[in-house]
Amino acid sequence: MRLGFRVFHAGATVALFFLTAAAFGDAKMSSPVLVELFTSEGCSSCPPADAALARLDKEQTVAGVPVIVLSEHVDYWDGPGWKDPFSSSQFSARQQAYGARFRLESVYTPQMVVDGREQFVGSNAPALRNALTKAASQNKAELRIVKAARNGSEVEVEIEAGHGATGPKGNLNVWVALARDRESVSIKGGENSGRNLEHVAVVRVLVNGGTMKGGGGFHRTVRVPLNPALKGMRAVVFLQPSDAGPIAAAAVRPLED
């Protein structure tokens, strides 16, 4: 089985997302939904999905559902022509775990995963809206990022979490992602040679900050190494079972420089 393949859209053009902005102060606002995009600069099918994720990040909501985005660059498209500077085998492994969870014959790019519940081609707007609506109706755990601040070559992320009255009761891994708000790269080789690609919420570091035990709470400051030269960063924390199951909660906070 080949690790990854491109997605071709024969006979039709998949529209980019049309997003409806909604104020975060609206009544009955749902808990945030995490949208992960598995992408690569070496994949010619990925730029439309990258652009769609950027639009989603800008608007922050779809049909009143608050959204947190992450761009995770896989490494199986890296080759002599071009190596994605943001790619990591860790993200490829994470996508593979989702592939097993969703019983896919093979992983692919661009792939969007919504709250660990549904997956689809990363530029499929109707699928996104449908998945967000379903995810927004789920009971979530409680999660708050109290602080996300630099301390020399580390970032200190203080996290408070609980299962809540109606949230999932099993053990949950507490994942901490440090993502850069914007990246712009001029591609010199490979399938996207000659293009300037823009990315948002590019994950530079992803660590497991611990486990929230079933029925218990979680309060910890997780220290994550980060190059001090990287500015314009955000911390994203999410709770997820160890089997790449549904996201139980997600939160985001800009990094204090």
Image (cartoon, rainbow, N blue to C red):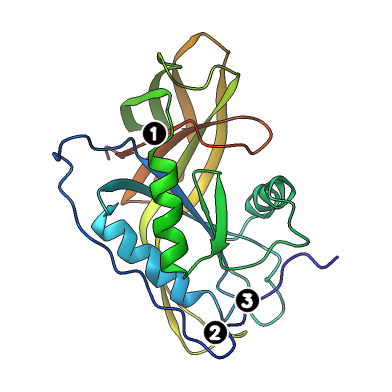
Determine whether 159 is above or below 53 in the image.
above
The N terminus sits in image quarter? bottom right
Where does residue 113 sit, x and y in percent of width and height? 53, 53
- Residue at left 67%, top 82%? 81
Determine whether 236 is above or below 125 in the image.
above
Label 3 sits on residue: 7
Where does residue 245 sit, x and y in percent of width and height? 62, 37
Identify which residue, 33 or 86, lies in the foreground.
33
Where does residue 181 sit, x and y in percent of width and height? 34, 55
Question: Which is more N-terminal, label 1 or label 2?
Answer: 1
- Residue at left 71%, top 52%? 96
Q: Residues within 10 Å of mark 3 (few under 14, many from 20)?
A: some
The image quarter in which residue 20 lies: bottom left
**Of tags 3 and 2, which is closer to the observer?**
3
Question: Which is more N-terminal, label 2 or label 3?
Answer: 3
| Mark 3, secondary structure of its residue | loop
Determine whether 58 is above or below 216 in the image.
below
**Of tags 3 and 1, which is closer to the observer?**
3
Left or right: 124 with respect to 117?
left
Can residue 201 be seen? no
| Mark 2, secondary structure of its residue | loop
* Distance Cα–Cα, label 3 vs label 2: 15 Å
Label 1 sits on residue: 152
Q: Residues within 10 Å of mark 2 (few under 14, many from 20)?
A: many
Identify which residue, 43 or 151, lies in the foreground.
43
Identify which residue, 161 or 253, lies in the foreground.
161
Amino acid type indicated by mark 2: Asn
In this view, which residue lies farthest toward the top?
Answer: 216
Label 2 sits on residue: 192
Question: Which is more N-terminal, label 1 or label 3?
Answer: 3
